[in-house]
Image: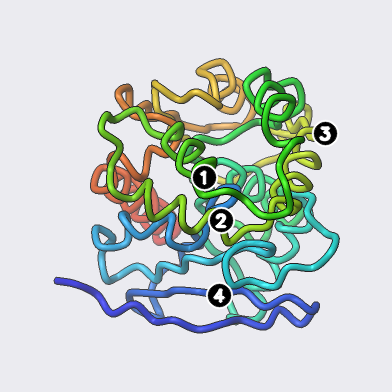
Amino acid sequence: MTQILRAHDVDLGNGITLPVREQGDPNGPPLILLHGNTDSWRSFEPVLPFLPARLRAIAITMRGHGDATKPPTGYAPADFAADVVALLDALGLPRAVICGHSFGGLVAQMVALGHPERAEGLVLAGAFPGMEGNPAIQDFWDGTIVHLGDELDLDFAREFQAGCVAQSPAPPIVEMAARESVRTPGWVFRESVHRAMALDLRPELSRIRVPTLLIWGGQDGFVSRDDQEDLRRGIPGARLLAYEEAGHAVHWEEPERFARDLTDFVDRLRSRRAA
């Protein structure tokens, strides 16, 4: 059964307003969904129909993206993490499971490190343990990002988003994601990646003390298996699921499987708390 998607904007009280899409039981276990660079809440559009109504799924568009406020500064992962905490405050949620894809995974880790009481668990999809020293990101920066204008070109966006999947031909969401991408200013993309490239969380991972699920595509061109092993070994008790035929955007290529694994993770957390 198709669920009703509730649309509203959330004023964080810090000059930032974020577009939000919610579905499911308003009193159900809250699940925050964080997209990657140049995406929006629509990054999780393929996943939402497969999530059960008993979960309160909350997909947000982060600062600088889509219809969210675009301040002139404040694009370090810590700034995005502070927005997530402010969002939880605005929604009256003491804590939530936080699921982040790609850059959103860095943001989720920052929430767990800086505000551990607000993260009930983490699901990190195609996530980096930090972008510092990542050769794929460095090549992307040197060859492309540093040269971007203040407006993203649709052809570039199509090529970028197509590079996030392994399927050929690319699934239809790639075109939608490309059209969402051009709504992110090029300077926001540059600044957020540049700030993330200075970040290596490996020395801090042992301080993440919440249950963590890693989901990674075996054909990911941005995040390596070694990166995933660093996360798995660094975060106590972290579990890794590999979707061997998927690329960086695992939730686009296998949305039903992703939703099933995400739901199972939330259900296990709830069972553990009830025991």
CA distance for labels 4 and 1: 22 Å
Amino acid at the residue labelled 3 = Ala
Q: CA distance from mark 2 to mark 4?
A: 17 Å
Relative image position of residue 78 (x, y in whole percent): 78, 52
Determine which residue is flagged by label 4: 19
Q: Secondary structure at mark 3?
A: loop
Say which residue label 3 marks. 198
Q: Amino acid at mark 1?
A: Ala
Q: CA distance from mark 3 to mark 1?
A: 24 Å
> For the point 35% across and 74% down, which residue is it?
23
Task: Report the coloring of the rendering.
Answer: rainbow
**Amino acid bearing label 2:** Val
CA separation in Å, label 3 and label 4: 28 Å
Residue at the spot of label 2:
182
Q: Is tag 2's residue or tag 4's residue first in the polypeptide sequence?
A: 4
Q: Is residue 259 above or below residue 143?
A: below
| Callout 2 touching callout 4 (CB < 8 Å) | no
Nearest to viewer (mark 2 / mark 4): 2
The local secondary structure at tag 4 comes to: strand
Location of mark 1 (residue): 157
Residue visible at 34% across and 55% down in the picture: 267
Specify which label sits upstream in the sequence, 2 or 1.
1
